[in-house]
Each structure stands twice: as C-alpha cells, then as structure tokens.
Image: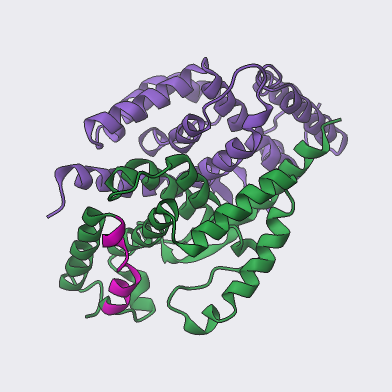
Chain colours: A green, B purple
Amino acid sequence: MITERLSRQIEFIVEMDKMKQIYRKNFVIGGERHETDAEHSWHLAIMAVLLAEHVDKAQVDVLKVLKMVLIHDVVEIDAGDTYCFDQQAGLDKAVRETQAADRLFGLLPDDQAGEFRALWEEFEQKQSPEARLADALDRLQPLLLHYHTQGKSWKLNNITSDKVKTRNQRTAAVAAELGQLVDEIIQDAVRKGYLKK
Amino acid sequence: MITERLSRQIEFIVEMDKMKQIYRKNFVIGGERHETDAEHSWHLAIMAVLLAEHVDKAQVDVLKVLKMVLIHDVVEIDAGDTYCFDQQAGLDKAVRETQAADRLFGLLPDDQAGEFRALWEEFEQKQSPEARLADALDRLQPLLLHYHTQGKSWKLNNITSDKVKTRNQRTAAVAAELGQLVDEIIQDAVRKGYLKK
C-alpha cells in the first residue's frame, strides 16, 4: 500500500486535471478555440525561464517564479475564470478564490499545502520580485495571443487600447525592455485595427 | 525598439503556442477531448514539484527537472506526437525530432538555444537523476489519466496490461513508492475492466 502522503499528492494531481477544462477569454493562436488555464500556465512557465533575465535591479529566484506561475490560477477550478475587464464579477472574486484555495491546497500534505498557499498569496499580493515578474508575464502572455489572433477577443469584448495599457502599466517598472515591448505591441495593434483607440 | 535578443525570445514564445494544438492519444479526465501537449507538460511540472521528494538515493535539481518537462515535447511542433505503442512511427522518430530541435531551439539566442537543446537531449537519454525522474513522470501522468477515464484510450487502442507494465517498468528504480503506485493502478485497472490482461 502507498503512504497517506503519496495518496494525498496524487489526489491533488488528479484534481488539477480540471485546469484543462477551464477556458479563458483569449483564443489560442490560429483562433479556433479558447485557451485553457493549464495551457496558459505552461506558457507562462516557458516565458519565466526565458525572460527572467530582463528583470531590473532585483535578482529573481526562477524556481519560485516557476512554482508561482504553475499554480497561480488553480483556484479557478472552484472559483471559475474571472474576466479581467469584468468589474462586476471582480467584486466577490477574492472571497470565491480564498474558499477555493482552502479546499484545493487542503488536499495536499500540510507542508506542501502551506508552500503552495504561501506562493499563491505572494502572487496575489504582487509585491515580491518573483510575484511582480509572474504578474507582468500573466499580462504579457495574453497580450501576445490577442495580437497574434488579430485582436479577435478584444473585438468581441469591445476592449480599447486604454484598458490594455492600464492592465500592462506595471510591466515597465518590472523590466524596462518588457515595458517597451508592451508599448510597441499595443501601438502596432491599434495601427493594424486589432484594437480600438 | 526592443533588442534582437528579446525579439528572438518572443518569436520562440509565440511559436510555442502550437503546443496547444498538438493532441495526445489520452483524454482529459471527463473524457470529452484529447489532452494537448501544453496541458500535459504543465501537469508534469506540477507533479515534479510535488513528487521529486520520492526519488531514491540521488538528490535531484528540481529547477532542472521543471525546465526539462516544460520543453520535453516541443519538438512535436514539427515532428508530431508519436504514439508510444506505435512501433512503425517510432522508426524515424529520432530523425524527425532532431530536425525539429534544430529549427525550434534555433529560434532562441545562442546561449538559451544551447541550454534548451542540452536539456532536451539529457531528457531523451534518460540517464541523469533529473532525466530519469522526468521520464518516470512522463509515463505516470498518462497512466493516471487512462485510469481516471476508465481506460477509454486503452480500449480504443487495444492495449494490454503487459504493455503498460513494460512502459512503466523503470519507475520503481527511480522511486520505489512511485513504482508501487504504478503496480497498484495497473492491478486495479485490470480488476475494474479498464485494461485487458
């Protein structure tokens, strides 16, 4: 018989499969379907490995950033994906997500539950160098997908360039060159008619 | 203008989106569609964080295992997913995947291309502690999905318990308790009629 510890780890791992059935607002490139939370989280992890070097001033712990982006959205298994431009749904988001964190991380052995819970809270607070980078990537990644799907989801949801700029405004403070990249993408998206001014 | 270096990193990151359109043989739990390579890679990364502690003898570098599982399948963007039980397709797999690695990792700045290429080759060789763990997880993860979809893909492809045992036989040498888990899952799958003896 396997130990209780391994049994709890496997229960959590199986529960995580639900991340493949939570669909985000943005489309995968090609545009034929929405992206899942699992795919989004994997994409952020690849970005973290490659782009951590651009962070200004502070050294970042890449392993910590990776763990953070891998689990940053798992509360959506219970709380659902809250569209970032939906102010109404945003109102009770914190309550729904805290309850989800209690249940989901509670499946794990206590020490690992504590580690994941702390990583998730640190991500939500957006203060540490690792959380600031994870947050900037969490905004840059959908920007890339929106741009490479000719703004399909922006158009469907009537999004303007001001909203996108506001959503990405902290990126320049995290990494100057990533901030410049964001500006160039938004300008070009407006120029090409993917995004309304 | 952003640097040539960042521009190459972003080109690779955008190319990686294709991992969301490569469908594997196994189904997501619930069973309504096949799993994508991006989802599979994310799931392995979560497993690596939680299960690395079970590895016997050698200490493993978790950051290295994470990078390895995140990129272990990206060659399938060009080479396609080769079904593990398809002997015919396996014959020219190495050639197709080497050409894919040349093109895909070649998109990156040289130092990062070299790092990813080395990680992918290390994974393929299955010798280092990190590669052996990554490989064991790469076999355990679909086993969990097959079991929790009542063997849907096993039945469709006429797979027997001997084949599944052979495919997972190295796991016990990587981590004794994970090996025991594999045995218990296979036995239970046979007992429940998910998998033919």
Identified at 42% across, 65% down, the residue is: A26
Identified at 28% across, 72% down, the residue is: A165
Q: Quadrant of the C terminus of chain B?
A: top right
Query: What residue span does the magenta drawing correspond to?
Result: A162-174
Q: Quadrant of the N terminus of chain B?
A: bottom left
**Observer able to see residue A12:** yes
Q: Is residue B157 left or right of residue A155?
A: right
State the image quarter where residue B184 is shown: top right
Secondary structure of the magenta portion, mostly?
helix
Q: Is residue A136 left or right of residue B162?
A: left
- Residue A170 among those drawn in magenta: yes
Nearest to the observer: residue A37 or residue A52 = A52
Identified at 69% across, 67% down, the residue is: A99
Count of marks, rendered view: 0
Q: Vertically, is A151 above or below A20?
A: below
State the image quarter where residue B51 is shown: top right
Query: Residue B120 in the image: x percent, y percent?
Result: 41, 26
Residue reaching furthest bottom? A88
- Residue A78 among those drawn in magenta: no
Identified at 57% across, 62% down, the residue is: A22
